[in-house]
Amino acid sequence: MSTTVVLITGALTGIGRAAALAFARDGHPIVAAGRHEEAGRELVTELRTLGTEAEFVRADVRHEDEVENLVDRTVARFGRLDAAVNCAGTEGTPGPLTKQTADTYAATFDTNVLGTLLSMKHELRIMLAQGSGSIVNVSSTYGHTGAPGASIYAASKHAVEGLTKSAALEAASSGVRVNIVAPGPIETAMLNRFTGTDERKAGLAASVPLKRTGRPEEIAQIIMFLTSDKASFITGASYLVDGGKTAQ
Amino acid sequence: MSRLGNKVALVTGGSRGIGAAIAKRLASDGASVVITYAKDSGAAAEVVKAIERGGGRAVAIRADAADAEAVKGAVAETVAIFGRLDVLVNNAGTAIPKTFEETTRDEMDRMIDINVRGTLAATQAALKYMQRGGRIIMIGSAVGERVATPGLVAYSATKGAVKMFSQGLSREVGSRGITVNNVQPGPIDTDLNPAAGEWAVPQKAATALDRYGHVDEVAALVAFVAGPDSSYITGANLTVDGGMNA
């Protein structure tokens, strides 16, 4: 595989972290973005140990100036941007819709929707000019189905699906592909917060046809495939990686 | 070890087009490959030779996908030859593009027999042998989900059936560690749907990338799904359509 310059938002935990490690093992230069300096420095040390060039840029995807700086520093450091993986996301405040407020709505949508929009806006600024590039946005199975107790999260992930497909149509003629990976229950801190107790998590795993939760590495692999040239005819698509949960 | 080392794959309709590309790709990833074909033994032999030249192992078996008994026989023969079956690619399919009202009953039956009945028969036969880690892969179609052009009414109905067959089956075999997925190509340049053909203009225009896809671009996705990296993907419809359905 040829070397691609990779930008990952939400790279410090969960799926974003697994993606960073997977790209690093294949020797791709990485810019990892997140909100926490110390965790960022530790991740970059780990990525460099795997033999790749890596930088951390502190960025909160809710703020356009920080996203703009993130993308500009990536290009300044590595000269280009080939693959962008937008993982930054939040589960917000799960609970019944009747308990939600304008604030819980804004907190979730600011990260999941505005954050994805701003990330793509600035990633595409570089990629459209290059005439090449591939973006993967991480949505959720809840971008495809409703979810009791997670209405705002589900709504935000549905929005990510629409944003992504529209971006794919706008970018296609410039040789840039934009796709979605929609994970089901994956072993991350977010899933633990979502389910609350071990019993509830076990119940969720039992409802998956493969009878287990997924590993972050299993999402990282499909992300790497979609950003690679192997996926050259795939754009505007949403790939469920959920152990069959949504097939039912 | 290569990604598919020690694995055995059966690709129906593997003598040409997308099926031939899949067979070659799985073989280059290390799998022993059986292809089935309906009529053209010369083309099937060419695929086998190409795989053998690359250092792989391949066998061609004549089995018309419209003949459920022949398909079942091909599955049994695969296991007899290579001792196991890990990956089934239900690729055999046909389209007869014309408006629905002009489509004859025989033409409808042919599409149903090959695209649906053959897929069901091959899958049922394969599940008898498949172990944990097994992969059932359908080659459905982007038009099994959304139809952007005229002339593919009955064909899209069969591919819609394949889509729900795949989703439903994933529920039944998931606990055995077998995944079931539906790869949905858009317009791919083959004998069946040539990029220069009369039906090509609206299809090309419907893609976001404004081009037909290459068979190798479908084979790459099938190889990913067949391999170990796709372990949490099942019941999914994986589109490779240049953005046609976006």
Image (tube, helix red, strand yellow):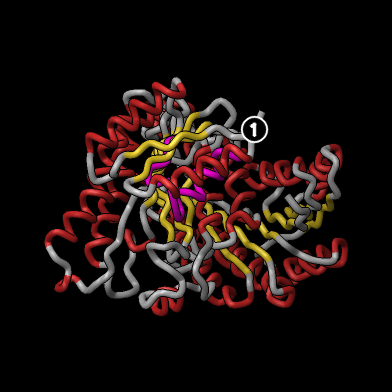
In the depicted view, which residue is nearer to us: B86 or A51?
Answer: B86
Where in the figure is residue A181, as x and y percent of width and height? 53, 52
| Identity of the residue furthest to the left in this view | B105
Residue B69 lies, with reference to residue A152, above or below; the image says: above
For disc 1, the neighbor class at 10 Å (few under 14, some 14 to 19, many from 20) is few
- Asked if residue A122 lies in the magenta stretch, the reply is no
Residue at the (21%, 74%) spot, across then down: B99
User: What are the residue bounds of the magenta stretch?
Assistant: B10-28
In the depicted view, which residue is nearer to us: A147 or B74?
Answer: B74
Q: Is residue A24 visible?
A: yes
Residue at numbered disc 1: B2
Q: SS class of the residue under badge 1?
A: loop
Where in the figure is residue B148, as x and y percent of width and height? 34, 73
The image quarter in which residue B86 lies = top left
Q: Badge 1 sits on which subunit? A: B
Residue at the (81%, 52%) spot, across then down: A29
| Identity of the residue furthest to the front in this view | B42
Residue at the (67%, 45%) spot, across then down: A19
Q: Amino acid at mark 1?
A: Ser
Name the side, left or right, on which B189 lies relative to B116.
right
